[in-house]
Amino acid sequence: MPIEVTMPKLSPTMETGVIAQWLKKVGDTVKEGDALADIETDKATMQMKSYDDGTIVHLDHAAGDEVALGERVLVLAKKGEDPKQVAENLGLSGAGGKSKAAALPAAEKKAEPAQEAGKKTEPAQAASTESHPADNGQPTQAEEPARPAGGRVKSSPLARKVAAAASVDIGQVKGTGPGGRIIRRDVDLYVEKKPQRAKAAAPAPQAAAGGGRRSSVPPPLAAQRIPHSRMRKTIAQRMSQAKQQAPEIHLSADIQADRIIAARTEINKHLAAEGIKVSLGDFITKAVALALRFHPGLNASFEPDAIVRHGEINIGIAVALDEGLIVPVLHHADGLGLREIRTQSEALAAAARANTLSSEQLTGGTFTISNLGMFGTQQFDAILNLPQVGILAVGAALKRPVIRDDRIEVGMVMTITLTADHRAVDGAMAAVFLQTLKGLLEEPASMLV
């Protein structure tokens, strides 16, 4: 029997996935572990891999299609099975609803019958399910969209939906999907460049009457309507749930950061030969992980019938992307040294920005850190990452007045703010956790013993 491959669950909150691009085509032989397609989830673009060996007989969907969890996406003929016979037995058509011939390997296709006599024949451009690495799937300036005369524009349902929401004539969009099919990313790119085209087409401002000088008032910017991405929709949903479901408490503490800055300087001298440079954020991650050992009530999740205190300490590190926020997870953070925290955090951030995070790297978090210190933000409140009961907001280390030995001096001070779910965390528990964290950060040597 052939193998039916369905849309997998690649993130905890995923309900549907968009096929960003196929990495294999009909007729390809695949092995267990081979990447089949790039799937756009509500979190990131991730690879769907094969769990079996076989030959691809049929693709149910084209690039750009949105597919529900558990819905079939392709069919594999098992080793030893005849792919052509499997396709005929199941009555399968090719990818995206093409003819039955498209479902078979190219080498086994039969020649097309000649067209009717008296009709002019035109060369047909072969459609390919493979993306072109040279242009990275994006239209170039030399390419112009072509609307078939009197025909329907080839586009995915999701692309048409996004185009309608953005008031875009989809016939003006250049398709980069299989056979020139318009997919979602084509519409998104068109919407992004729409203000630039409008600006280029606008007439040049005329000189002011009488004085011959141009007005100092800049022209108004073109209005934009940006459809919600899947990530933005998920963020909006989860943030709304957090504010509605969890009564939050917020506690702040000022950290005198002079010693931790000095410790970082010394450690980086020793790590310079390795090309590693630890940050203040790495010290904070280490301190949070150790503080959670002493206060397991914060390393927990809230469920309707119980509070689950986790055995592992897995720290989620919020990473800002152009399209939203994502929280990859640093597993077993309490057992990592500063060097390991730095290298693993950098790898997670790089994977997040490249849309290559694995399902494991996005799941299992027990506590979250959101750091805006690098932007100069002094203090802010973070919203809970449910079902976790705690999240720490980290501000910038800035020069501020401090009192030492009854004297006012200038010191480096950093404000941290804990947000906790009051259904699981009482005020005293949160305060003691913050007190422990403050002690670790102000005496960084205590983290190294």
Image: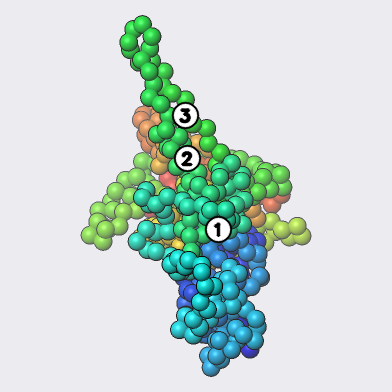
| Residue 166, x across and y down, in percent | 58, 43
Circles 3 and 2: CB atoms closer than 8 Å: no
Q: Nearer the viewer, residue 371 or 296?
A: 371
| Residue 300, x across and y down, in percent | 63, 58
User: How many tags in the picture?
Assistant: 3
On screen, residue 394 above or below 334:
above
Task: Specify few, some or many for label 3: CA neighbours under 10 Å numbering under 14, 14-19, or 20 or more.
Answer: few
Q: Residue at x 47, y 43 (%)?
A: 192
Q: Residue at x 59, y 41 (%)?
A: 167
Q: Residue at x 66, y 70 (%)?
A: 70
The residue that label 3 is drawn on is 221
User: How far is mark 1 from mark 3, CA to CA?
Assistant: 32 Å
The residue that label 2 is drawn on is 194
Q: Which label number is shown at residue 344?
A: none
Farthest top residue in view: 210
User: How far is mark 2 from mark 1, CA to CA?
Assistant: 21 Å
The answer to whether one can see residue 334 in this image is no
On screen, residue 39 above or below 436:
below
Earlier residue among tags 2 and 1: 1
> In terms of image quadrants, where is residue 349?
bottom left
Going by the image, does 242 lie left or right of 98?
right
Q: Quadrant of the N terminus?
A: bottom right
Task: Specify few, some or many for label 2: CA neighbours under 10 Å numbering under 14, 14-19, or 20 or more.
Answer: some
The residue that label 1 is drawn on is 154
Earlier residue among tags 1 and 3: 1
Q: Nearer the viewer, residue 87 or 354?
A: 87
